[in-house]
Amino acid sequence: MESKNILVAAEDVDDAGIIHDMLRREFDNVAVSTDPGKAVEDFETHRPAVLVLAFTTLAQAQAYYLGLYRLSTEVHGMPHRTIILCSKGELEQVYVLCKKGYYANYVLFWPLGYDSNRLPMEVHHALQQMGIGEAEGPTAAEFAAQARRIQGLEAMLEQNLAIGQEQLDLASQSFDRAGDEIETALEGFSRRLASEQRGELLEHWDRGGFEAAIDRLARELDQLKQGQIGQNLSAARASIEPIRQWAYQLKQQLEPQMESIRTLQQMSDAVKPLVLIVDDDEFQHRLLRRVLAGVDLELCFAASSSEARR
C-alpha cells in the first residue's frame, strides 16, 4: 500500500519540503510539485494515489485543482484521494467542501501548531480506501464521489468567470473615467486661456488677433480630443470586448456539459455513503444518530463485533 505515489502540491518550496520530509518517514514514493507551469506534467508523471494540496489559502488550492481538471487530459481517469491542508480561519469552508465530496479529507495545518501525526494518518486512510477500491472495482459511492468533485469544479469555474467579468467591468469603467477626466482637463485648460487676464499679451497683440489665436488653439485642442485621444480611448475600450465575448461564449459552450454535471450531481446525491457504528451502548447509538442527523449519510449500527461482521 505504501508503495503507491503521493504528490505534495504547494506554492512555497519550504512548505513543500517540510511536508515531504514528514511523509517520507512513513511512505516511500513522495514527490513535490511547486512550479505552477508544470502542475499538469507533475501530476501525470507521478500519477499519485494521494494528492496533498499544501497551499496556504483555500483559493490557491482550488485554483490548482481546477487547473488540473481544465488542462489535463488524464486526471479524470486517474483515481486518487485529495487531502487539503487548511488554516483555522478557513476550516469551516474546507469542511463544507469535504462534506460535499470535493476533497477526500482535510487537515488543520496552518500555522504549524498541529497534531504532527494527523497528516500521515490521513494519508494511510486514503491509501487504504484506494486499495479497497482497486480490489472491488469502482462502486456507486466512487462514482458519486467523482460526481461531487466535478460539481465542485463547476462552482469554481463559475466563480472565476464572475471574477473575470468583474475585472472587465472595472477596466471599462476606468477607461470611461479617464476619457471624462481628459475631456474635462482639456476644456478647463481652454477656458482658462480664454478668461485669463490679457494684460501683458494685449500690450503686444491687438484684441482681435489675440482672440483669434485663442479660438484657433481651442479648435486644435478639440481636434486633439476628438482625434488622437478619443481614438486611442476607443481602441482601448474595444480591446476589452473580445475578452468579454470570449467569456460569454465559453459559458454558453460549457452549458450543455454543465447541465450534464448537474444531472450527475442529482444522481450522486441519491448514493449516500454507508457508515457502520459499532458500540455496545444503546445510548451512544442514539447520541451519534442525533449528532450525525444533519450529515447526508446512511447509518448502520452494531452492538458487537460479531454483529458488525454480519
Image (spheres, rainbow, N blue to C red):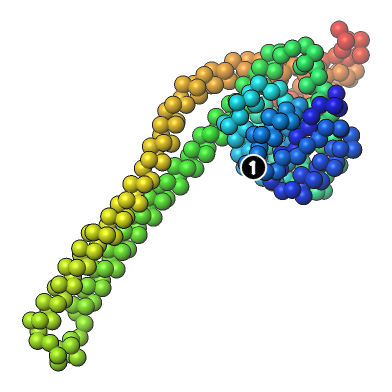
Mark 1 residue element: helix
Image position, residue 181 (x, y; %): 32, 63
The image quadrant of residue 224 is bottom left
Left or right of 32? Residue 254 is: left
Q: Most extreme residue toward the top, as rendered? A: 310
Quick check: 51 left or right of 218? Answer: right
Residue 68, horizontal then vertical, whole percent: 62, 32
Q: Position of residue 92 (x, y in %)?
A: 68, 39
Residue at x 65%, y 18% (from the top left corner): 144
Answer whether residue 6 is visible to the viewer in this image: yes
Look at 85% across and 23% down and name the residue there: 1
Q: Which residue is tagged 1?
A: 36
Kind of residue at badge 1: Pro
Q: Quadrant of residue 130?
A: top right
In front: 113, or 59? Answer: 59
Q: Position of residue 219 (x, y in %)?
A: 16, 68
Q: Residue at x 86, y 38 (%)?
A: 24
260 horizontally vs 136: left or right: left
Looking at this view, name the residue that lies furthest to the left. 208
**Where 274 sits versus 5, above or below?**
above
Give the quadrant of residue 27.
top right
Judge left or right: residue 96 versus residue 52. Answer: left
